[in-house]
Image (cartoon, grey):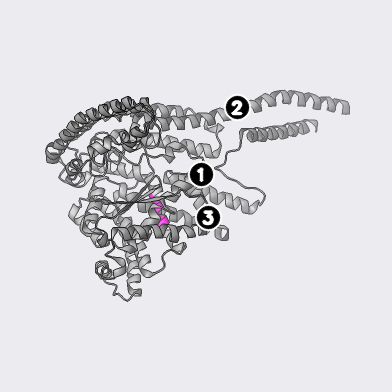
Amino acid sequence: MQEFSAFKLYLLVSVLGTWLIPLTHTISRNQEQESQTLKRLQNEVYKLRFQEHPEFATFFGIHDFDDSLESYTMEAYKRRKEICENFLKLVDDIDQTQLNRGEKRELRILKSYLQAFIDGYEWKDYGALNPINFLEGITNGPFWTMYAKPKTKDDYQKYLKRLATFPKQIEEEMDLMKKAIRLKRTSHKVSVDRVPKMLENWPVYQMFLYPFQEALEDSKLSPELRSKLGRKAEELLVPINKSLKKFQKFMEKDYAAATRPSPGVHSYPNGDKYYRACLKWYIGYDISPEEIFELGVKEVDRIEREMKNIMESVGFPSEDLKSFFQYAKYIPKFYNHSKEELLFKYKEILNHKIRPKLSRLFNNISLPKIAIVPVEKDGPWGSYGRNVFYVNLKEPRKRSTFMMLPLAIHETDPGHHFQEAYTALYDVPAYRTHSMISKLYSVPFHFPVYSAYTEGWALYAEYLGDEMGLYNDPFEKFGKYCSEIFRACRLVIDTGIHAFGWTRERAIEFLSNYSDFPKSQIEAEVDRYITWPGQACAYKIGEMKIKSLRKKAETILGRDFNIKEFHHEILSIGSVPLDIMEEVINDWISSKQFWNHNRNIRYDANVKPSSAATSKQYHCGLILLTFTVVFTLLN
């Protein structure tokens, strides 16, 4: 009997071994194939945007398409939609069962990214017909000239070819806007009335010939070739100037006469549905204008109470905010500063106040150097892009210094600059790290930029200033609430204009009641909301989502909640829809709970084991299964 049992053991192990070893190799190979397919499609979607938007590629240092410009035609719109549909089919073909949890999440993000663009095609005859406004488009100059970086003869010839294409691009944009006129879907006048003057002030020669100045002179090309290239570039400025003059005339007469009378897009045919589509694009899920409006009203009331408490604490009657703003204007340390003084103060805030305290709430990371660059224009107080903090110093003596700290936190650290630097340390797909944050006129027919995540984080960062010990006196704390109530007002104003028929004047008056901004700044802000329906709602909704997830984690984890780990989970995933961010935090909470019960095990859904480790796991599992079967048969 013992001999027979030994024979059975030998036979079973031989047979199962022969079957299991090839199977484990097949499983491992299938997993690797599906994983690589996902990565390949992510990269191809990233390259697609470069091919279709060559200026965007130049901006990010990709010079493969420096000889072309973006096409503004209905045919191009259709082509981009069809390409995304083909990509989506390939994404759907991926076998999800062969992916780990982190990869499955990336698959869902890629699907939603493509689907959002495809769904937006329904609205191609709305905002996408109006590619020029005072915030974006050619009015602010061709930024790509600053990033072209030609070195060789071929580089310069590519640049010349792009210059030659520019008049055609202007014609295409005018054709789209003419279609908007025919369909009665033009922009409101405040979105475009500044445009002719902005074009008139263009330094055309300096802009377009920028790469032909110092760079060409310092190149290794022969003097004869440099001279020839320079002359050709100057020749091409003649048709460029002609096309710009034609466009300026078109904007002053034809388009200006046809701008929509109402500031809200609800006045468009099917405008209510269009506005809801814009809100969904920015926020990431369906939410009604009524819900946003009510949320905004409640937040404004809550923050106003906090501001009035501070007013009382400094001995000022808690009447209305406007009276307090007027009172503060006569306190010398808050107003009447020169541009140079404000610029110096911003540098002091960033380098000596904020950065030394980041380690209280965040893991230590190496931060790139950030330049602080002054600008003067009708627009936001500040903005950020590629390690540059742009500070608006127009009418400097009317700008309060107690608003500077929350702005610096929002745009630099731990806001956008910190967010960008932190995400760069992790394996986030390039199509999400290099978002196309311009072209918001075309929303919802545009690739998602996940504004609720990015802007929500920056507003949440302002809130963290309290926990970092940055708001050291009542007025700095008041400035923090000024910034927050400003974002809450946006929820009321954006929906008020685009869904409930608010006039521009009503919106300006409402915002003036809660802000000490100069009148020109407030008007520019409201004009921005009119121009980009839905965009202003992303900030507060994103911030409130992060706060609610933090509160949930703190409640469930109790003493095991770690603020640095929480911030790591939010920042390391990169820009995502809010539902994905929530899933990540829920997974983190579950892993922390699991860790508490199993101290020797750590679960991290974002880490994918190597193919070798995966193979070993399968082999061990299958060997265990083999011995279980054998043991059962022998007994």
Compared across the picture, whether 225 is left or right of 595 comes to left
Earlier sequence position, callout 1 versus callout 3: 1
Q: Is 517 placed above or below 429 here?
A: below
Compared across the picture, whether 50 is left or right of 326 comes to right
Q: Is 324 placed above or below 10 here?
A: below
Q: Which mark is residue 564?
A: 3
**CA distance for labels 1 and 2:** 29 Å
Question: What x and y, as percent, mark residue 59?
Answer: 36, 37
Does the magenta-highlighted stretch encompass residue 458?
A: yes
Q: At 46% from the left edge and 57% from the top edge, which residue is drawn?
A: 355
Q: Amino acid at mark 1?
A: Leu
Q: Amino acid at mark 3?
A: Lys
Report the mark closest to the observer, 1 or 2.
1
Q: At 34% from the left edge and 74% from the top edge, which residue is drawn?
A: 314
Asked whether residue 559 appears in the rendered view, the answer is: yes
The reply to whether callout 1 and callout 3 are in contact (CB within 8 Å) is no
Residue placed under numbered mark 1 in the picture: 425
Residue at disc 1, secondary structure? loop
Residue placed under numbered mark 2 in the picture: 29
Quadrant location of the N terminus in the rendered image = top right
Q: Is 243 placed above or below 596 here?
A: above
Q: Amino acid at mark 2?
A: Arg
